Image: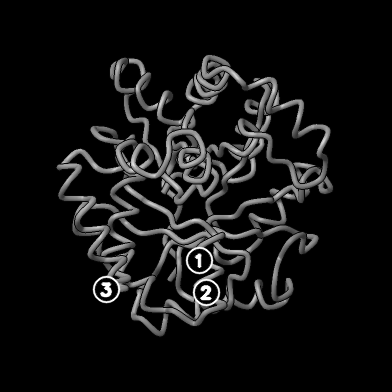
Amino acid sequence: MDRLLFGDNQFFGVNHMSEEKARAQAIQFHAVEAIIEVLDVAYAAGIRTFMCTTHERIAEVCDHVRSHPERYEGFTFYPCMPYAHKYANAVTEQGMLGALRQFMPDDGFMNAALRGGKALASKDIEGIVTLLVDAEMKMFAGLSTPVIFLQNVVVDLLLGLGFDEAFSIFSAHVRSRYNAEPGFITMNLPMLLDALDRVGEENPIVCSNINKLGFRVSGGLDAYELALTERRFRPIAMSVYASGAIPPREALEWLHSLPADPAIVFGASTAGHIRGTVQLVEQIWGEPVAALSPVTD
């Protein structure tokens, strides 16, 4: 993984500290051209990885990148799925059949629909999971997607249900069909690592809140620091600034002091914030932001 990954919360009105700012950003990025403009700034600053949801407008971003391969050399996507609101909105606007046609993979609508029907009828969880992954990955066809993430809304639900097997199903399908590594986003890092150990996932890629204040760190900061010290996994830190509560240099220097040396995903909506973050990371780590983050021993 690269040291610094660019996220997409700011594009879709997600801000954990300010609803007013979230609304303003949603308006700012209503048009896909505004999103692409910010991604171009990030790319020019040296960022090569876009960790994104499967929101409808990301499909337009994918179309744009596919249409300009020479302009985005080395650019990769880290899809994060599912984006639950997308399905609910599609069913409301197009009906169940229209939603199925929109999201089914290109390898045959009837085949996919029958596979989904059989899976639902027989409660075949593996069939349902693989069908949904294939539907979400449709927009990324032909693009580089070396890591595919399961969103925390599903990961943490599965943790609560104790359904560890689903993580293995997701992992196996991502590896076999997309030649990619599975990633997992969670709000409870220690609990997820225990579950992944139980199903034999070795050195997994896990994204979670990691910040000096313990902001939105379920299980407590002490448990996180212990996991980052003693567990073998590849961490990605999000909410590193605690939604603006920690000054950037202080937040990043604390992160750099951790033994696990995680990669970082951040969101920004202005050129100044993007360039400032890149500059800080390169100063503190002493390497380009696209340099590979080491694997935890």
* Residue type of the residue flagged with mark 2: Leu
Q: Which residue is mark 1?
A: 155
* Way the structure is coloured: one colour
Apparent side of residue 111 relative to residue 256 in the rendered image (left or right): left
Viewer-nearest of discs 2 and 3: 3
> Would you say the residues marked 1 and 2 are in contact, meaning their CB atoms lie under 8 Å apart?
yes
Q: Which mark is residue 192?
A: 2
Name the residue at 43% across, 25% down.
Answer: 61
What is the spatial separation of the Cα atoms under label 1 and label 2, in whole angstroms? 8 Å
- SS of the residue under disc 3: helix
Foreground pick, 111 / 126: 111
Against 187, residue 33 (above or below) is above
Q: Position of residue 12 (x, y in %)?
A: 62, 34
Quarter-of-image position of residue 13: top right
- SS of the residue under disc 2: helix
Foreground pick, 69 / 150: 150
Q: Which residue is mark 3?
A: 122
